[in-house]
Image (cartoon, coloured by chain):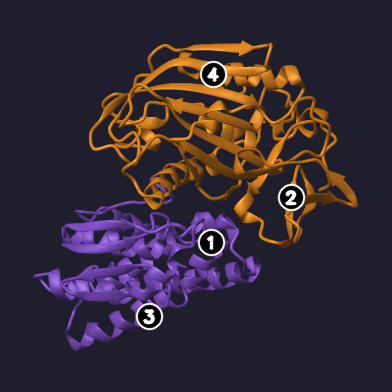
Chain colours: A orange, B purple
Amino acid sequence: MSLTDDRAALDQWYVLGALQDFPVGTVASRLLGEDLTVTHGNDGTLEVQTSGRRLPVRTDYDHLWTSAGTPSRPVFDLPEAREPDRRSIYCGAVKVRASGLRLIENFLDLAHFPYVHSDVLGTEEKPEVAKYEVEQRRDVDELWATKCEFFQPRAAAASDEGQISQYMYRVVSPFNVTLYKTPPTAPNRWDVIALFVQPVEEAVSVAHPYMLLIDDTSTDAELIAFQQMIFLQDKIVLENQRPLLLPLQPGRETPTRADLSSVLYRRWLKEKQLRFGVEERAELA
Amino acid sequence: MLKLYDYVLSDGCYKVRLMLSLLGVEYERRAVDFFPGREHQSEAFLDLNPLGQLPVLEDDGLVLCGAEAILCHLANRYDGNGTWLPRDPARFGPTMMWLAFAGQQLHALSQARLVSMLGEPGDLDSLRASARAALRLLEDHLTDRGLARDEWIVGDAPTVADIAAFPAVALSHDSGIGHEDYPALNLWQRRLRRLPGFASMPGVPDYF
């Protein structure tokens, strides 16, 4: 497979890894079906190339960003990254054999907490998803889900009891999403957990989870272990979902009220005419 | 209290967590940032285990490295019935043999998993081929055991050999190897999952 011709996918910023993943030298990477090289020069410069073409590079939030097209905007703003008392935790890249869009959609989903993250992010005794609000903010071209609430037996690494977590979700581009949730130790602030997805092939992705947390008790290793445990519980579900690509035509999968954010996300992708990672329209029998 | 130097996604650490859980032994966990931090290669960790490998167990002044050795230690010390580590001549040798098999041949699955999932260096095709050969061997062995009406890798009760082999087999999906070709392994996994005190980990399928 070679580089996609999907304009909507090309003209976006993508994470290739945390800056620490690129020591001085050249390493291979891959994005949207095409091989890339990343060169970290002795002088500290970072260069991304594909077939002799130099791609734009950004280093926002300690990650290496690039684009194989022409993004109309800079990498999205994450004001929390400038708050000095936050711990910025890079959780390590994990490869998942599924469409990147499936990863984002799963990240937005509250309803799976009790079943996939049993006794951690949810409990089967309290599976109900309370009503929440979704909106498409057209001025910034982002999707938001707000006023989400869920009872969580163990909301984060620092939890020693259950809590009702407040959540907000913010989809900043088709393959990048952040969530805001109540930290166990600072109920009046928000923890930020981001998922940067590097779409490698249509049905193969690399997930780069990244956290900006309020937590002065857990070690880095504990914070990373917690996030990796959660993410790996999702991975097995994502890899067994069929189709691996995300279907956008109505009727292919049946949403419920709890899936409001997924409905909006799919509608938004369709509006953008994004195709990379989308299941091609199949005639329904 | 026992202290386990643990990495949540390590199948080697999972062997020990599973054994501790089946034996009902309380322990303390010290999270090690194996990935992405490579803490197991840090100076402080190398002081603890010069091999730079997980798991490590501290118990009463002993520092033990290597999952198989730790399983034997736990069974030797905390299994009052002595069934997990059988001492009779008919079963001791075979248990040791399959324990080594789990640490050696099945290790290809662990390596394939790290390459496939975390992008560690390695020849994935060749590791998968070795992994499939090891799974086939264990599948054939368990098929023979089933015909002899014995349900476990050695004898008619689970031993440390079963615990040592389970994680790599159960997590094979992570390296792109499904369970559909291994019916005897599926039955064996199902039996193991029903043991009182069984503990799971992310990536171990629930759909049995």
Location of residue A44 (image quadrant)? bottom right
Label 4 crowding class (10 Å Cα cut-off): few <14, some 14-19, many 20+? many
The image shows residue A67 at horizontal and vertical percentages of: 78, 38
Q: Is residue A130 above or below residue A155?
A: above
1 vs 3, front mark: 1
Q: Is residue A85 above or below residue A44?
A: above
Specify which label sits upstream in the sequence, 1 or 3.
Answer: 3
Q: How many marks?
A: 4
Q: Secondary structure at mark 3?
A: helix
Identify residue type, mark 1: Leu
Quarter occupied by the N terminus of chain B: bottom left
Mark 3 lies on residue: B100
In the image, A278 versus B111, the foreground residue is: B111
Q: CA distance from mark 2 to mark 4?
A: 29 Å
Identify residue type, mark 3: Ala
Residue B201 in the figure: left or right of residue A211: left
In the image, A226 versus B193, the foreground residue is: A226
Mark 4 lies on residue: A261
Q: Secondary structure at mark 1?
A: helix
Label 3 crowding class (10 Å Cα cut-off): few <14, some 14-19, many 20+? some
Identify residue type, mark 4: Ser
Specify which label sits upstream in the sequence, 2 or 4.
Answer: 2
Q: Secondary structure at mark 2?
A: strand
The tag on residue B29 is: none
Mark 1 lies on residue: B114
Instruction: Identify the subunit bearing mark 3.
Output: B
